[in-house]
Structure formats: structure tokens, C-alpha cells
Image (cartoon, rainbow, N blue to C red):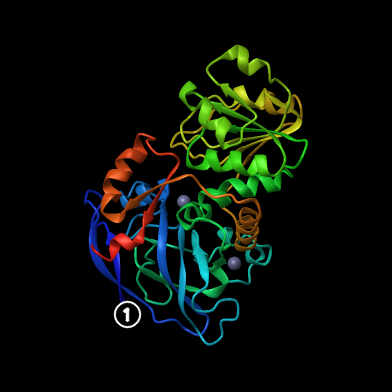
């Protein structure tokens, strides 16, 4: 074991503070990374504040699952990485590798999946610690290759926000000639717009905020609809192949089901605390489907990163020092970020 610097919360009500955590020495199959940037995901905030009853937080908690860094050491059996390579780690650091979910590249649904933070750590017997840290050690199978041509601060959010939006767009076969809607323009939505556009679709953003129209167009939308305007909404009735809904508050899904063409799909990636109301009629008339989607497996995540390298896609980020993480959480709650915070881990050296 060795000591790593980290930022942790000691309880649900505590601010973040600098601490030292123990990481394992790399085993033959492990890759050790120096973490350069870590994105801030809304899940980090929920977990740090113990807001998920199904996943009680073990303190101290070190969140962070949008990790990008440079390989510092590899185990003797590692074949895909060497010291000096750029690499990324997302929401998962381990799984059994043998179940049907793992065999079909859906490791996120493996019954033995290990999440990057606040999950039982098979190596240490404690919990996993995430990316708000200067280094991490991860099994090679869960380490992603990062294209060298991209800005690393903007790569970090691809590891969660990126794959979360990429997976459903790919599952629905989004390609040239398709009409795709993206509801909500936040950390997830802005990635959905970039991907749908790069995949060749005609992209329409739905937002409640007229102030976001200009930004949506800059990010790649062909059209922007202010969703409170019923007349603007009705112009698009029956025309979408797919709508990706990133909003994590309860809202009227029928307004969007109505805009799907026959066999169209509405996929939810936002998760409100309260259930949505859905009438079967909204689905039956037009053979429409309503889906959900959870991050993505390792192979699709690599495919997404390679696509980003080819198309020059990164997240739009505001880079912050780790000392500002509490302030960033408060701003996240007000949606006051365009469009993701990315922590520059060099700031941890002086902490
Ligand atoms: Zn996340
Ligand atoms: Zn499995």
C-alpha cells in the first residue's frame, strides 16, 4: 500500500478537506495513474451528502468518476498500457468478467460490478476511493485509452456524462438523416447535442430557458425549441426518431412522446426523485417506446473516446482547483456551470 493525496468529506454535512488515503500497490494486472483532471458529476454530490438511501455513503468519502491522467506504473501482466500513456477511468473499476452482462459488454449491470467510489473494495477490504485524488490504481480491463489530440480537462467528463449520452444514441441507431431531440442543456444534454450532431442527425434542443438558445446552436443544434411555447412544440409533432431526455426533475413526458414519429423512442437518462406519470395511450398510438439508459460498458466507452478523438469532441468545462469543490457543488445545484466542472489535480499538490 502507498499513501495518496485526496479530498474527502468526513460526513454528509462536512465540507471537503485534504486527507491521505491508502491505495494498493499495482498487482500484475493493474495500471497506476497520476490523475490530471477529474470531472464533477451530480452523482458525486448525491453520494458525498448521503442522499441515496439504496447506496449509503461510507465516510470518509472520496468521490470522482470522470478521471483522466497519465500512466505512472503498470503490473507485469499488463499489455495495453505503459508508463507515460494517457488513460481514463469512468464509473467502474472492476466486475467479475464472466457473467452474461460482462460477456456482452454491459459491465455496469454485472452483479459483481465495483463502482469507482463508495463500493466495497475487494483488494483493501474497505471502500473504493474516486478521482478527487492525485493517483489511482485500476485493473487494466477498466482503464480506457485516451486520444492524444484532445484537451484533457474536457476529456474527463466524457467518462460519465459522455458515455451516458453516447450509449442510448448508439442503441437507437442515430445516424445521418435521423431527427433527434435533446431535452435539457446541462452536463448530459450538451454532450448529447455534440454526439447527435457528429453522428449526422438533425438535432433539436428543447430547453425551458430562452437564454440557452444561442449556446445550443453553438454546441451543434440545428434548431432550438423553448419547450414552454406550445405552438413551437406542436410544429414538431410526430417527427422525431428519437428524443434523449436529460432532465432530472419531474416533467410532462407526453409533451415529448407526442413529438415522436411511429416507432420513435424517448430515452430517459435523468433520474428525478419522484415518478413520472405516463399514460399507456401516449405509447400505444404510434408504437412508441420509452426507455432508460445507465452509463455504458467498457467497450462502448472506448468506442466513444475514439469517436471523440476522430471528431475533436470534448465536454465544455470550467476548470477549477480542488480547493473550490464545495463552491462548485453549490453552483451545480443552481445549474450555474457551462457545462461541467473539471478539477485540475495539479492544485492538489499545493493543498
Ligand atoms: Zn457520473
Ligand atoms: Zn459480470
Q: Quadrant of residue 266?
A: top right
Q: Is residue 183 visible?
A: no
Ligand 2 lies in quarter: bottom right
**Residue 216 in the figure: left or right of residue 272:** right
Q: Is residue 298 visible?
A: yes
Q: Quadrant of residue 200?
A: top right
Which residue is the site of mark 1?
Answer: 2
Quarter that holds the C terminus = bottom left
Residue 68 is situated, as x and y percent measured from the top left of the image, at: 47, 62
- Mark 1 surroundings within 10 Å by alpha-carbon count, few (fewer than 14), some (14 through 19), many (20 or more): few
Q: Quadrant of residue 117?
A: bottom left
Residue 160 is situated, as x and y percent measured from the top left of the image, at: 51, 52
> Which residue lies at the image location 63% right of the left edge and 66% below the top edge?
102
**Residue 186 in the figure: left or right of residue 104:** left
- Does the beta carbon at disc 1 come under 8 Å from ligand 1? no
> Which residue lies at the image location 39% right of the left edge and 62% below the top edge?
130
Quarter that holds the N terminus = bottom left
318 or 125: which is nearer to us? 318
Give the residue furthest to the top: 231
Q: Is residue 151 above or below residue 214?
A: below
Residue 330 is situated, as x and y percent measured from the top left of the image, at: 30, 40
> Which residue lies at the image location 70% right of the left edge and 44% below the top edge?
199
Q: Is residue 50 above or below residue 345?
A: above
> Which residue lies at the image location 58% right of the left edge and 30% below the top edge?
217
**Residue 179 in the figure: left or right of residue 85:** right
Residue 256 is situated, as x and y percent measured from the top left of the image, at: 62, 26
Give the residue furthest to the bottom: 76
Name the secondary structure under disc 1: strand
Q: Is residue 195 above or below residue 153?
A: above
Amino acid at each position: 500500500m502507498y499513501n495518496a493525496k485526496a479530498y474527502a468529506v468526513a460526513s454528509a454535512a462536512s465540507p471537503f478537506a485534504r486527507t491521505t488515503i491508502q491505495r494498493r500497490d499495482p498487482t500484475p494486472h493493474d495500471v497506476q495513474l497520476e490523475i490530471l483532471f477529474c470531472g464533477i458529476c451530480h452523482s458525486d454530490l448525491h453520494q458525498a451528502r448521503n442522499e441515496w438511501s439504496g447506496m449509503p455513503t461510507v465516510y470518509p468519502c472520496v468521490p470522482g468518476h470522470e478521471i483522466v491522467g497519465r500512466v505512472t506504473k503498470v503490473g507485469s501482466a499488463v499489455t495495453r498500457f505503459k508508463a507515460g500513456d494517457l488513460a481514463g477511468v469512468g464509473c467502474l473499476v472492476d466486475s467479475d468478467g464472466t457473467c452474461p452482462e460482462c460477456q456482452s459488454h454491459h459491465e455496469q449491470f454485472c452483479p459483481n460490478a465495483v463502482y469507482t467510489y463508495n463500493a466495497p473494495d475487494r483488494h483493501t477490504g474497505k471502500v473504493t476511493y474516486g478521482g478527487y485524488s492525485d493517483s489511482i490504481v485500476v485493473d487494466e480491463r477498466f482503464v480506457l485509452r485516451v486520444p492524444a489530440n484532445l484537451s484533457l480537462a474536457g476529456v474527463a467528463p466524457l467518462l460519465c456524462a459522455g458515455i451516458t449520452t453516447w450509449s442510448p444514441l448508439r442503441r437507437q441507431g442515430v445516424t445521418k438523416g435521423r431527427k433527434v431531440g435533446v431535452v435539457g442543456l446541462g452536463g448530459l444534454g450538451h454532450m448529447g447535442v455534440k454526439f447527435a450532431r457528429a453522428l449526422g442527425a438533425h438535432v433539436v434542443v428543447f430547453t425551458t430557458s430562452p437564454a440557452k438558445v444561442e449556446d445550443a446552436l453553438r454546441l451543434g443544434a440545428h434548431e432550438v425549441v423553448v419547450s414552454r411555447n406550445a405552438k413551437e412544440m406542436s410544429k414538431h409533432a410526430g417527427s422525431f426518431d428519437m428524443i434523449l431526455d436529460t432532465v432530472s426533475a419531474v416533467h410532462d413526458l407526453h409533451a415529448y412522446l407526442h413529438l415522436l414519429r411511429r416507432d420513435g423512442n424517448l430515452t430517459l437518462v435523468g433520474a428525478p426523485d419522484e415518478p413520472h406519470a405516463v399514460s399507456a395511450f401516449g405509447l400505444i398510438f404510434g408504437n412508441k417506446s420509452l426507455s432508460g439508459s445507465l452509463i455504458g460498458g467498457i467497450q462502448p466507452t472506448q468506442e466513444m473516446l475514439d469517436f471523440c478523438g476522430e471528431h475533436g469532441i470534448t465536454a465544455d468545462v470550467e476548470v477549477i482547483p480542488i480547493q473550490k469543490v464545495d463552491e462548485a457543488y453549490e453552483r451545480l445545484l443552481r445549474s450555474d456551470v457551462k457545462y461541467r466542472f473539471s478539477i485540475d489535480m495539479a492544485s492538489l499538490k499545493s493543498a
